[in-house]
Each structure stands twice: as C-alpha cells, then as structure tokens.
Image (cartoon, rainbow, N blue to C red):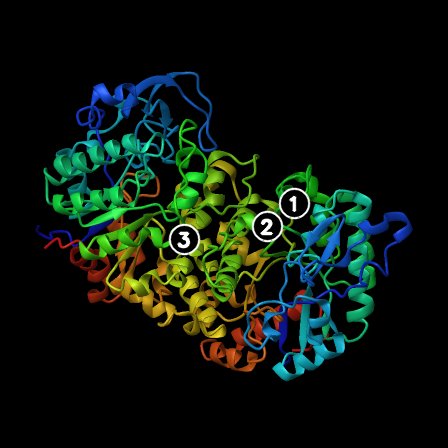
C-alpha cells in the first residue's frame, strides 16, 4: 500500500453488517441464536438515559449485546457530546460499516490505513453467551467476514482476528493456525481469561453453561497459544481495559458524562495492574519473540508501570526469581502501546518511540476524527521528524507488514 | 533543609486497644492478638480475624525483603517502638515522619468494618490517643494523623475536634466508605459536608491513602512465588488509587471547599500526569464545562487542592513537577513497607534531585509537607 498522508491508525473499529453472521452460520444448527438485529425496547445503562421507544439491538444467543445501540460510532453521529449511539440500523452512517464508503472518511481525515478492532455485537472481542460450539461458529464467522469484506475491499485495512476460548486449547490453537493462513497479522484477546468468565455483563457466560472456568492467564495451559502466536508472528492485542475492572464504586449522583469522565482514567489504564503480571509471569522470557500491543489505553500510565516494575525488581532482587532481564528492557523488546492525544504521555514516555503507535479510535467516542491531523499537531509539537514518522506510521507498517 | 517523609506507617503493638478500651463493656470484641493453631498470631477484631500487621508490612526490615513476621515478638523494634524508629530515621537521613496506621488499615479502613458503632468509635479513639501518647509525645519528629469513625458523621466531626486538640495534624479518611460499611454514603454525598467543613475550618489535610479496598487491586495470581506476589501487590496498590483521584476531581467536593487539602498517600507520582491529562480530555470532549459549569478544569482542581506522594519514581517526578506542579508533590520513604527506599533514601533522593530545580527539590522534600502539617521549619 501507499503512504500518502503519513498516518496509520493502529486502533480503529470495523462494524460488521446485519447479515455478517446470518450469512455464515448454519440456520439449521443455531437458528435464532445467530447474532442478528432485532426490535426491542431500549435498556437503561449507567451511560444512557431511559427510553420507551422501539429500537433495534444486536441479539447473541438470545441476549442483548451492547445496550447502548446497534453500532458504536458516536464520532459519526453529529452529536457534539459524542454520546449518541444509533438506535436503529438505518441510522448507521455507511462510513461505519461499508468498507469502500469508509475509505472516503479515511481520506477526509487524512488516514492512510487502519488496524481493525471489533465493534458490536462483539465490542469486547468475545462470544461467551453460549457453548463452545456456538462460540467457535461466531468467532469463525467474524474472522471470515472481516477478512473477506474489509481486507478484501482494500489493503488499507489490517483486520485483527478473534480467538475462541471455551472449546479447549487445541481448538483455540487450531483457529489461530486457520486465521494465520487467512492472512491475519494479530489477534485480540481478553487480558485475564479466568475473570472474563467469572465476571458479569458482556463477559459472563450464559446461565445455561455455568460449567466453564477458563484457566488463569499465567497458567501453563495457555502455552500452546503463546507458542502459536510466536510461530506465526501474530501480535497479541489487548484493547482498552481488556476485561480488567478495578474501579471505585461509581457515584449514582453523576450525570452520564460525569460517570464517563470519573472512570475513564482508570478504565484506559486498567492494564497498569495487569502488565506487571505479563512481566513477572515469565511468559515474555519463555517466548522472547512474542509481541503484545495495548490499544486505546494511552501511554502515560505505562511510565508508572515501567518505573514500578523496575523498582520492585531491584528492591526485591527478582532476578533470583527467574525474571532475568530488567522489566523495562523486557517490555521495550516485546510490548507496543497506542496513544491518540497525550502530550504529557508522549513527553514522559520511557519506552522508545519505536514501541508507540498512534491511533484514531474511529468511530468511537474518544476518536480524533475528523480532526486527526490537528490533534496530532498538538500531541507531537516539538517532536523530531524521524520520531513522528515512527509513531504515526512506520512502527505500524513494520509490525503489520504493510509495505 | 530537613527531609520530611510524608507517608510512613506505625505498627500497632498488642496493647494499643486492650489497654484503652473497657473489657467489661466490650469483652473480647476489643482488638487483641490471638495465637493460631499453627503458632502464628493474628488480630481478632469483633470476632473477625485480621493479619498480624493488618494491611501494613514490615518488609523493609527483613533481610530478603520478603515475607512478614508471624508472631509479634518477631516484629522488628524499628517498626513499632518510637525510639528505635527515630534511630532508623537517623540512619536513613529522615528528619520528620508522617504516620499512617497498619493494623488499623494503611488507609484507616479496618474499623469501618466494625458493625457496632460504639466499638468502632472506641477503637478509633484508642488509636488516636495511642499515636499522641506513645509517638507524638516522644518526639516532634513524628507527625500524627487521626482516624475517624464512619458510622456517624456527627461523631466523626466530634472526634476530629478532639483529635486536633490533642495534636493530630491531619485526618485519614478511607475513600470508599460505602464499600466498607453497610449504610455508609458514597464519599461524594452531601452527607459528608460537615466532615469537609471541619477539615477546612481547622485547616487539617484529608488523607486518602491507597490500599483501602481489595477490589481496587487486581488479585495476584496464586501460581506466583511469594516474592513475585508481594512485588505485584506493591505495584497494583498505587495503581488502585487511579479511580479515587479521578472521582475526587470530578466530584465537585473541592469546588464547595476550595481550601480543602487532599493528600493521596502511596499514590506515586507516575500516574498523576496521565490521570489529569485523560480527565481533562474527557472534560472537554464530554462538555462538562458547558453542562455543569465547573469553576476550574479537572487538572486545575488537582493543582489547587491535591497532593500526590512519591517515593522511588524518579523518572516521572520531573515531568510531574513541570506539568502538575512541584507544590503538589510530597516525598516519602514509605517505611517500613518492603517497597520502601529505607535505608537507601539518601541515594534515592540524590537520584531524583538531579532531575529537579533547587526550588522544586525543596518543595517536594520539605516545604510542602511543612506547610500542610504546620511543622516548625523555617525556610
């Protein structure tokens, strides 16, 4: 592909259309459980107000997914506070879900290419609503649809694959092999599989399948997955909090926009509590060519993590516990992080610029669209040109083999 | 210039509560040590078991910085005896030490879980008296901070008045009362106005220390070695204060109380620029100013009212001084936690001092704390 604008968004979100799953999953086998849009009344959430109107929502295995709307695309909805989610499919702008229409939005915003993360009905990148067979069928339909419809439409799109969790590690690895053959360059995962299934809401398993208990992230159970991702040169991605929730109780007296503002620093930085485990579990030592990337987290908190891990490593002599290399050096070799607006985060960054990638987060609420170049100008003011190029496109082009 | 360590912990000895609370009235519900079948000791508080050091630690005093004492007789004297503590401070070059609890909870959270309001108040008062009688009375180098009961705001206010008269210099408030005590309001509720009023009136800083609630921290993976587990905990605890800080600056408490000083103990400074930058971005993008007419941006609320506490993070400190402000940062040795800079505080201080201007260095190491705690130090 050609670099024309000098900007790759390393974290954008592709919206699959209403037929993506219906066209790829067996009606005879899964019937109404297949992810599809259906009319319902709008559910109330912490971030939305109550409404009685008849709306549409995604249903997966008979349960509503993403209570806020049919697509997560507030940046495209002409709403100044960017909280509005389309309530019916006909409201969704074509640039959100039609790959060729989307290219016009990329041109409008001056973006060369996008790395594609999921959107409803699988914002979190998991299908835990049913059994293992259902999950695998949903995951494969998603992976096929994204590759065929988006990558098939343009090499300006680099899709990331989902993985199945519930059918055993062999099934997980088999799907990784399959998507590697399809041309994928990375996968999206939950950070802590064990709490993903014990959790609530979108992360919880359906009540009729209470038996699943996934192994902890640091359990050797996952070793074949790490080995496969390393062998196939697939970067593993965590997106935003990646399922890690460590929040003080949210005050009920807040309006929705205050709720968002009061929780978003802890939400984007939730991995600050998990990355120490990535280091201290020794996984990076055992798989030294395996790469991780965290999207929609920003970079500022990572400076804390590097300082804190190095301090405890020194203070407690953790090399004697098998953590042979200084944590910040280890993460420098194997960890990538994305940022979209932080002036201070970039200024204080202790990782080399070779590990930072810019993202627009299009079309989500925090997105820099349609003023990405303005935001970049402010974010990277005074940053030397070679460093700018690394952050804005060279790192992504290299990591995802785009040139 | 004297060095003030703004966040250290006393370890409460076995008689702190039994010597001050009536056994005839509360019988064995009074906090006391109990021998376990395996020979170790734990605290019993209103029938509930609590670790020997509460949520505190004496790891800095152990040769390998790992594990904790199993019986009180194994607790090193520098952790619990004031005179030996002074010697430990001398060895480390520390002039003043601001004291937080351990058994009573590093964030003062232990007694909030005591169901009987009278026993809760008795435990809080006993701690507050203990700290004055046994520590502050020994040396003006110890800076005492009081606990409050959470069962009733009125009795909290009364206890603050009493404690301030006795010499306490600040008020430790667990930032998540609603998760500690059934029926306690969320910290943002107007029910706490009398609390903020009295702290403003008496010019007493409020301390929200990290570690108030296990749910704010990711539980360590059971398969890690004890030393790696302790390292994980030391990193997740400060990170767990992120949503406490962001909630406070959105809450509008500081707008109602512009003179209130709020100290985020064991926060480190590395996360603060991140929290403020992300909060300001959301503040603008979500139209908070337009909708709710805040007096200041969220980062300016922090700059006016708040303090973060650093101990080792010398990489982040220059940036935090430049972006947030040197007047918003306190330094601490975090003694006697395993993560503490003790007994190497001088080398930690000289490492981060290289990154700061002389004025910044003086503010962080001395004058901010001297002003907050009204220490007898002349610039």
Q: Residues within 10 Å of mark 2 (few under 14, many from 20)?
A: many
Which chain letter goes with mark 2?
B
Residue pictured at 18% horizontal, 38% vertical? A105
Res A370 seen here:
no
The answer to whether residue B336 is above or below residue B275 is below
Distance of label 1 from label 3 (alpha carbons): 25 Å
The answer to whether residue A144 is above or below residue A383 is above
Report the front residue among A93 and B186: B186
Q: Residues within 10 Å of mark 1 (few under 14, many from 20)?
A: some
CB contact under 8 Å: marks 2 and 1: yes
Horizontally, residue A223 falls left or right of residue B120, namely: left
Res B117 seen here:
yes
Q: Which mark is residue A271?
A: 3
Q: Position of residue A33 (x, y in %)?
A: 30, 23
Q: How many marks?
A: 3
Which chain letter goes with mark 3?
A
Horizontally, residue B152 falls left or right of residue A49, namely: right
Horizontally, residue B98 falls left or right of residue A181, namely: right
Q: Which residue is mark 2?
A: B213
Label 1 SS: helix
Which chain letter goes with mark 1?
B
Q: Position of residue B5 (x, y in %)?
A: 62, 72
Q: Residue furthest front?
A: B37
Distance of label 2 from label 1 (alpha carbons): 8 Å
Q: Position of residue A140 (x, y in %)?
A: 21, 35
Residue pictured at 73% horizontal, 71% vertical? B73
Mark 2 or mark 1: whose residue is earlier in sequence: 1
Q: Which residue is mark 1?
A: B180
């Amino acid at each position: 592909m050609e670099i024309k604008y000098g900007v790759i968004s390393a974290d954008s979100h592709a919206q699959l259309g209403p037929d993506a799953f219906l066209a790829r999953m067996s009606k005879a086998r899964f019937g109404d459980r297949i992810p599809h849009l259906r009319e319902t009344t709008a559910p109330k959430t912490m971030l939305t107000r109550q409404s009685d109107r008849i709306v549409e929502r995604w249903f997966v295995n008979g349960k509503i997914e993403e209570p806020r709307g049919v697509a997560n695309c507030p940046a495209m909805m002409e709403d100044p506070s960017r909280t509005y989610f389309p309530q019916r499919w006909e409201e969704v702008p074509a640039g959100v879900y039609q790959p060729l229409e989307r290219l016009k939005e990329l041109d409008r915003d001056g973006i060369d290419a996008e790395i594609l993360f999921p959107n409803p009905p699988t914002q979190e990148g998991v299908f835990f609503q049913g059994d293992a067979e259902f999950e695998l069928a949903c995951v494969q339909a998603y992976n096929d649809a994204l590759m065929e419809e988006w990558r098939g439409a343009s090499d300006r799109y680099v899709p990331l694959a989902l993985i199945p969790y519930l059918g055993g590690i062999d099934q997980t690895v088999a799907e990784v092999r399959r998507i590697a053959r399809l041309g994928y360059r990375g996968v999206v995962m939950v950070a802590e599989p064990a709490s993903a299934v014990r959790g609530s809401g979108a992360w919880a398993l359906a009540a009729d399948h209470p038996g699943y208990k996934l192994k902890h992230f640091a359990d050797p159970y996952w070793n074949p997955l790490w080995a496969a991702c390393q062998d196939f040169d697939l970067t593993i991605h965590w997106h935003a909090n990646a399922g890690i929730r460590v929040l003080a109780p949210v005050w009920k007296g807040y309006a929705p926009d205050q709720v968002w503002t009061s929780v978003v620093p802890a939400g984007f930085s939730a991995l600050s509590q998990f990355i120490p485990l990535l280091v201290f579990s020794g996984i990076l030592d055992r798989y030294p060519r395996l790469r991780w990337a965290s999207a929609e987290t920003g970079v500022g908190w990572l400076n804390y993590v590097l300082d804190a891990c190095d301090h405890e490593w020194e203070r407690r002599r953790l090399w004697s516990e098998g953590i042979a290399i200084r944590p910040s050096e280890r993460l420098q070799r194997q960890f990538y992080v994305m940022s979209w607006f932080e002036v201070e985060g970039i200024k204080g960054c202790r990782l080399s610029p070779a590990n930072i990638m810019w993202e627009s987060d299009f079309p989500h609420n925090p997105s820099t669209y349609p003023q990405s170049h303005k935001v970049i100008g402010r974010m990277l003011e005074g940053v030397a040109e070679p460093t700018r190029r690394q952050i804005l496109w060279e790192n992504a082009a290299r990591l995802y083999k785009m040139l | 210039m004297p060095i003030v360590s703004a966040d250290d912990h006393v370890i409460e000895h076995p008689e702190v509560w039994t010597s001050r609370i009536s056994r005839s009235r509360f019988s064995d519900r009074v906090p006391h040590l109990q021998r376990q079948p395996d020979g170790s000791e734990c605290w019993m508080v209103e029938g509930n078991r609590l670790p020997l050091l509460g949520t505190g630690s004496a790891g800095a005093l152990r040769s390998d910085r790992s594990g904790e004492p199993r019986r009180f007789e194994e607790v090193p004297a520098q952790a619990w005896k004031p005179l030996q503590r002074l010697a430990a401070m001398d060895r480390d070059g520390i002039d003043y030490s601001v004291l937080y609890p351990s058994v009573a909870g590093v964030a003062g959270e232990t007694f909030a879980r005591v169901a009987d309001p009278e026993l809760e108040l008795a435990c809080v008062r006993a701690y507050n008296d203990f700290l004055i009688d046994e520590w502050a009375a020994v040396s003006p180098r110890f800076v005492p901070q009081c606990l409050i009961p959470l069962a009733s705001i009125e009795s909290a206010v009364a206890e603050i008045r009493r404690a301030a008269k006795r010499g306490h210099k600040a008020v430790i408030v667990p930032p998540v009362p609603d998760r500690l005590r059934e029926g306690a309001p969320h910290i943002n509720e107007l029910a706490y106005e009398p609390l903020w009023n009295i702290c403003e009136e008496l010019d007493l800083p409020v301390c929200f220390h990290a570690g108030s609630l296990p749910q704010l921290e990711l539980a360590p993976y059971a398969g890690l070695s004890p030393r790696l587990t302790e390292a994980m905990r030391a990193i997740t605890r400060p990170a767990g204060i992120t949503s406490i800080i962001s909630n406070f600056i959105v809450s509008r408490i500081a707008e109602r109380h512009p003179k209130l000083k709020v100290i985020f103990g064991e926060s480190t400074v590395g996360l603060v620029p991140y929290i403020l930058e992300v909060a300001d971005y959301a503040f603008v993008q979500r139209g908070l100013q337009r909708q709710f007419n805040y007096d200041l941006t969220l980062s300016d609320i922090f700059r006016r009212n708040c303090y973060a506490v650093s101990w080792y993070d010398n990489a982040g400190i220059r940036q935090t001084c430049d972006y947030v402000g040197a007047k918003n940062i306190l330094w601490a040795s975090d003694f006697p936690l395993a993560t503490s800079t003790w007994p190497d505080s001088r080398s930690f201080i000289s490492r981060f001092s290289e990154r700061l201007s002389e004025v910044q260095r003086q503010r962080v190491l001395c004058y901010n704390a001297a002003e907050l705690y009204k220490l007898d130090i002349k610039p």
